[in-house]
Amino acid sequence: MRLVQVFVPAGELELVLETIEDAGVDYAVAEETSHDEFEAVVSIPVPPAAVEPLLSAFRDAGLDDDSYTIVTAAETIVSDRTDDLIGQFSGTRISREELQSRAMDLAPAASTYYVLLVVSTIIATAGLLLDSAATIIGAMVVAPLMGPALAASVGVVVDDDELATRGVTLQIVGLLASVATAAVIGWVLRGTVLLPPGFDITTVPQIQERITPNVLALFLALGSGIAGVVSLVRNVGSVLVGVAIAVALVPPAATAGLGIAWGHPTVVVTAGTLVLVNLLSINLTALLVLWLSGYRPHRGASVERVYGRLRSRVVVLLVAIAVLSLVLGAVTYGTYQTASVEHDVQTELESMSDDPVFAELQFRAVGVDYELIDIYTGDVPSVTVLVERPPGQQEPPDFAESVRERLEAATGHDLDVAVELVDTQRSES
């Protein structure tokens, strides 16, 4: 339930009361004597779904903007009359005015926002370098990205240009700050005793996850955007939703920064693409869900103009996501191909170990060097095979060629195969 209180300007009490009675809700009037500008305070208990129609009725009746209308959440109302009100006004979403107010509150002051985001990025960068999922998730609790993401969409839908611009600016500058922060941290830590000599960021699983993004990664961003709007319009807890939005944005942004520090263009491109796709997807779903939820500007004349702007933004976002998704699709295909070659090599070597043609030789895959970039540069996969040979046994003629041909037939790729023969003795108790 909500408690709507109207500070009625002098001479407009009758207008206010007629509007309330037309709306069919209960009210109470208290005389206002502390200031000559207002003659009364009218208190109106209503369900959340009734707030927006009531405020629109006041506006249509010509109630001056100089009056105060306050909407507060009523924790408890003890009355049997509320059942009739709730039945009269069905719905669960909050009013347009409450939505706009909450969106403004969710987007913190710039100084607070950037401090929290930098701190979150520092923690997330440490979590990436340590390969600690728990540390990364902990950093996401600090990241204040949910507010700007939703504020931008709310501003567009309710025709608040200042709120929309502020939301977009905070998102873009904030993510650039995250990338820069991670790059500085990586540059400072690189070559120090805190990281082992020859440390390669691409071998860290948590970083590797962000530089080999799958098309399925879109579902996190799309789901986060929908959940963020639902938590906002239904006035339910948004902390966990904020974590989900931060997870979609901060770790890949930090990964892109580490790619800059280590001079890995591929890391920067793939992680940066993931950041952009997630950012655009969150904003797209937020815009669509807000509009489909029925939110419009309070001025009827602005609806058509706002709809045109919304439609243009949606088209731009869809095109941008589609273009960037081509990169995700290429990464998904490349990751599948590299994994497929490694799997086929391992499977064939196991089969060769059991093949009587090779007697007691045992095949082991020491390494398959086939990176994502090799798929598109046309480089041949390089396979190193370790073969355990019992003492005194001779390998078949043209042994390396036979191994290469078997592996090429199994993988369907040309391969560069190196075979290492090791005389092996085993002692069994």
Image (spheres, grey):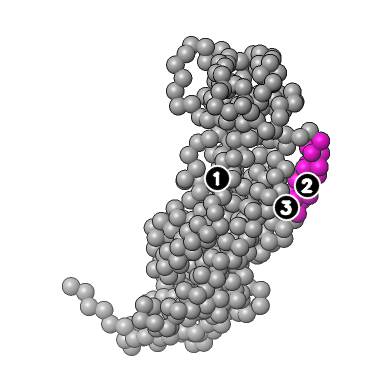
| Residue 365, horizontal then vertical, whole percent | 44, 75
Q: Exactly how many numbered labels are in the figure?
A: 3
Residue 88 left/right relative to 129: right
Task: Point out the tag, 1 or 2, that comes first from the N-terminus.
Answer: 1
Relative to 368, does residue 232 appear above or below in the rendering?
above
**Which type of secondary structure does the marked residue at label 2 adopt?**
helix
Please say whether residue 286 is one of the residues in the magenta stretch: no
Residue 247 visible in the current orientation: no
Residue at x 63%, y 35% (from the top left corner): 97
**Which type of secondary structure does the marked residue at label 1 adopt?**
helix
Residue 415 left/right relative to 356: right
Identify the magenta region: 301-318
Question: What's under tag 1, amino acid-wise?
Answer: Asp
| Residue 397, horizontal then vertical, whole percent | 49, 87
Residue 167 visible in the current orientation: yes
Question: What's under tag 3, amino acid-wise?
Answer: Leu
Q: For mark 2, what is the residue?
A: 309
Residue at x 53%, y 82% (from the top left corner): 417
